[in-house]
Structures are given as C-alpha cells and as structure tokens.
Amino acid sequence: MDDSVIRTDGLTKRYGHVLAVDGLSLDVSRGRIFGLLGPNGSGKTTLMSMLLGLVRPTAGSFSLFGNLLEKGGLDRELHRIGALIETPTFYPYLSGRNNLAYFQGISGRGNPQELDLLLEQVGLGGRGGDKFQTYSLGMKQRLGLAYTLLGDPELLVLDEPTNGMDPAGMAEVRDLIRGLASENRSVILSSHLLNEVEQVCDSVAILSHGRLIAQGDVADLLQERGRPQVRLRTTNDGKAWEILTALAWVDGISADNGYLVASVEADRSWEITAALSRNEVYVAEMAPAQMSLEQYFLDVTEGDP
C-alpha cells in the first residue's frame, strides 16, 4: 500500500527566464508533519501553489493520495485538502462566525453544525461573534485555521500558521497541529520560525533557489551533520565571543537564548575554560549542546541571500 499523501517527481516551474522550482522530488507520508523551509525566494510558495492547483507546473508530475494527477485530475482531490496560504482575508464587517458560515456555504465544505466546534478548537470560542475588523493578526490566523479545517480534510497545507501570535498562541497551534497528525492527517508546514518547526515537525525539506538541498527526518538530519558543541554562559559573553572566535580549534560560535554555543570537541571544553580565564573571563555554566535546526539550516543555505 502506498503511504504517500504527496509525491512529486521532477516538479518544475519556470516564469520566463526565472526558474522558481527546479526538478523537485519530494515524498510526504500519511500522518506526518512535514516542514517546508527555505530562504525568501527559494520556491516554497510556488511549490505549495502547484500542489493546490493555483499554478500549473512547467514540467514534472505529482500525485496526491496515491493518485497520479493528469490534466484536470486535481479538482477531484481538492476537497480532501485544507490550505492556509499567507494572511487570510475575510469580510471586515462580518463576525468571525458569520464569515466562516458564509465561506462554508459557498464552498460546500463541511456543514454549519461544526462551526462553533471549529471556533472553539482554534481558540476563538469566545470571540466568534466579534467583527473580523476587530481581530488581531493572530486571531485572523486562527480564523483562517478554522476555515482550513472545514470538511475534515486529510491534508493541511499551512503557510506561516502562527504569524502574529504570542508564545501562548504558538504553543496552542503546535498542540492543535500535533493532534491533527495523531488522527492520521498529514500537515505541510512552511514557517520562518525554525524553533517552532523543530518542535512540531517530524521531517523537513529545505529549498534553495528552487532546488532541494536537504530532506529527511529532523532528528536524522541533525545527527548526520551535527558537530560536537558546548553551551556556556560567562561573566562577559561579548569578550568571550571575541576570544573563542580567535581560537583555531573552535569551528564556530553562535548565540542562543542568552547562551554562547561553541562548536568544539567535548574533550576540549576544559581548554575553553582555560582560554577564557587567562583573559579574566570566567565560565558560569557549561554543558554539551545538540545542533539546532536553525544552525543546520544556516549551514546548508550558507551564501544564500
């Protein structure tokens, strides 16, 4: 049995002389949360638009739910997909619930009886009667998510779903996405918030200039490319940065949530302490660190604008 929800084979899109997507081959399995990453202009939005039938490929092919899509075949599968691409737009003078009811009616997705449940599910249970124009950006995103869930779709395509949300809202959406995947749905998630992606996605694909440069389970990618690191806090992190950057045996240094992260063999961590103390900088905390998805992303896209 084919467990792929989406499979692309050499998918290509050209706009005149611009090659937006270049021979892309991807595989997204059922029940998985799949992160789609890349710098601005890497082809993410074009790829999602092709999968949703908004843009026609120049070359290549793709299948949905195990069905190879010939001309016109996508229309038969779209009812199984919910999509949130960029910032959702609704009628400003209608309430959130009435907007949802209106678009449910014209699309034929789902039924009116599920609207209140969906609003509750996305955290708008108490605000469904408020006009859309009074919503914050995060609330507008939540309403877009509610519309995406109309009709109980098997596949969700979400572009920056936590845009404008505070940390608590992001955590709620993470839990919502995990819950949807646990029901054997698949989610394609595009986001610039790599820490969010690392927390919620099972696997990722990274695009650069329309080409696929990395794909796999998040844990496997970080392990394959990961290099030994130590995480430390010092009495003078600015000076410590300068000192460690100058050491030939330190492969790199970065900042992470109030800590310095140095790429160095674990058995040389004592040398970090010695080098810093010679310059009257002292280590307050030090522990081994694992490579983050953000560091991995910066490594593989190095040199991209």
Image (cartoon, rainbow, N blue to C red):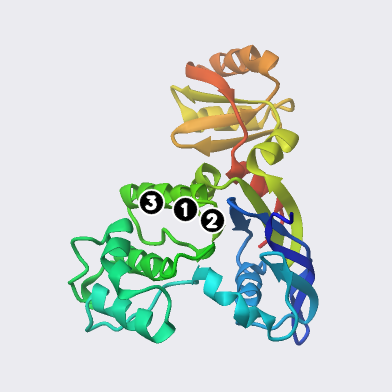
Towards the viewer: 110 or 180:
110
Q: Position of residue 248 (x, y in %)?
A: 74, 28
Residue type, label 1? Leu
Q: Residues within 10 Å of mark 2 (few under 14, many from 20)?
A: many
Towards the viewer: 111 or 305:
111
Q: Is residue 53 visible?
A: no
Please state which of the two labelled residues, at mark 2 or mark 3, is closer to the viewer.
2
Res. 304 image quadrant: bottom right
Residue type, label 2? Arg
Q: Secondary structure at mark 2?
A: loop
Disc 1: which residue: 180
Q: Residues within 10 Å of mark 3 (few under 14, many from 20)?
A: some
Q: Point out the tag, 1 or 3, that comes first from the N-terminus.
A: 3
Who's the residue at 60% across and 12% down the image?
274
Q: Judge from the rendering whether residue 8 lies leftward or rightward of residue 230; answer left or right.
A: right
Disc 3: which residue: 170
Who's the residue at 60% across and 43% down the image?
293
Q: Is residue 18 visible?
A: yes
Disc 2: which residue: 185
Contact check, label 1 and label 3, Cβ < 8 Å: no
Res. 44 image quadrant: bottom right
Q: Determine the CA span between mark 1 and mark 2.
A: 6 Å
Residue type, label 3? Met
Q: Determine the CA span between mark 1 and mark 3.
A: 15 Å
Q: Point out the tag, 1 or 2, that comes first from the N-terminus.
A: 1
Q: Position of residue 124 (x, y in %)?
A: 26, 61
**Quadrant where the N terminus lies?**
bottom right
Towards the viewer: 109 or 29:
109
Question: Total label count?
Answer: 3
Q: Judge from the rendering whether residue 262 lies leftward or rightward of residue 236; answer left or right.
A: right
Who's the residue at 64% across and 51% down the image?
204
Q: Position of residue 76 (x, y in %)?
A: 61, 79
